[in-house]
Image (cartoon, grey):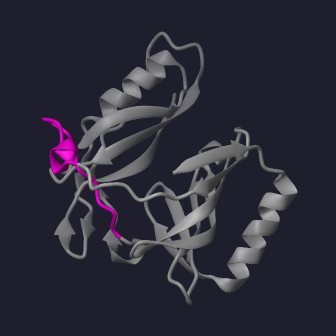
Amino acid sequence: MHLFGHRLDHDYYFELLREEERAAHSITRETDFGNEVFCIDPKTETLLIHESRSRASRSSHFSYVYRNYEKFGDHLFPRSVQYRSEGEADVEINVSELNSEDSPNPSDFTPLSGALETTNCLPNEMTPPRTLSVPDPDFPGHAHTNEALVILWMIVGVDGRAHDIQVVRSGGDIFDTEAVRTVGRWRFEAPSCRGEVVAAPINVEVNFWR
């Protein structure tokens, strides 16, 4: 598979969104922290648009537009993917060639020790995690501001705990450290796919005030 990419023109990008939305069926998944929209072509059942929006911060909004699907074996593969995120350069990725190769050795995909396996569940089959215990963060005593916002990405495991916590939007080092520490103490009702408990990634926001 060969890829190449370039920056997208903003007006062209939004025209793509409007064009695809007119023909698509949309599914919205709401969580405590924001929502995700999936637009699907009802004729081919292919994904056209995936958009994620945070409730509190525009900087964590992003969208993907998938176009020019081509049959590849028993599957359909998008030849063009457009990506846009607030504060970042727009990107278009085009696949110039699809090639089949010999099946890889299954042992190459054996999970590493301690790794978390997430699901590929369809949005309408997924039940997102629900917060059960959300202790507030401690405000750093030597901070030079009265408020801060930290956005974190994490995987909610089948144990209802946060794993692989990463800072998506920094509020400053002392706030980032406290946010990661705090979210590590949060407890969730684990996400599920068709009733089966699974691990799944989410974004969360940690607000600081004093």
Q: Is residue 1 above or below residue 164?
A: below
Residue 137 in sight: no
> Which residue is rendered at x = 44% and y = 45% of the image?
204
Quarter location, residue 52 = bottom right
Magenta region includes residue 109: yes
Where does the image place residue 95, in percent across and percent down from the top left? 61, 55
Question: Which residue lies most toward the right here?
Answer: 11
- Picture quadrant where residue 37 is located: bottom right
Q: Main secondary structure of the magenta part?
A: loop
Quadrant assignment, res 184:
top left
Extreme-top residue of the structure: 142
Q: Residue at x 48, y 9 (%)?
A: 142
Q: Position of residue 162 (x, y in %)?
A: 27, 42
In screen coordinates, is 6 left or right of 73?
A: right
Residue 98 position (above or below residue 23): above
In the image, the segment drawn in magenta is 105-121
Q: Is residue 196 above or below residue 25?
A: above
Name the spot of residue 45 as percent of width and height, x first: 50, 82
The answer to whether 105 appears left or right of 54 in the picture is left
| Residue 63 placement, left or right of 204 | right
Q: Does residue 169 show up magenta in the picture?
A: no
In x, y percent, where is residue 7?
A: 77, 44
Q: Is residue 187 above or below residue 182?
A: below
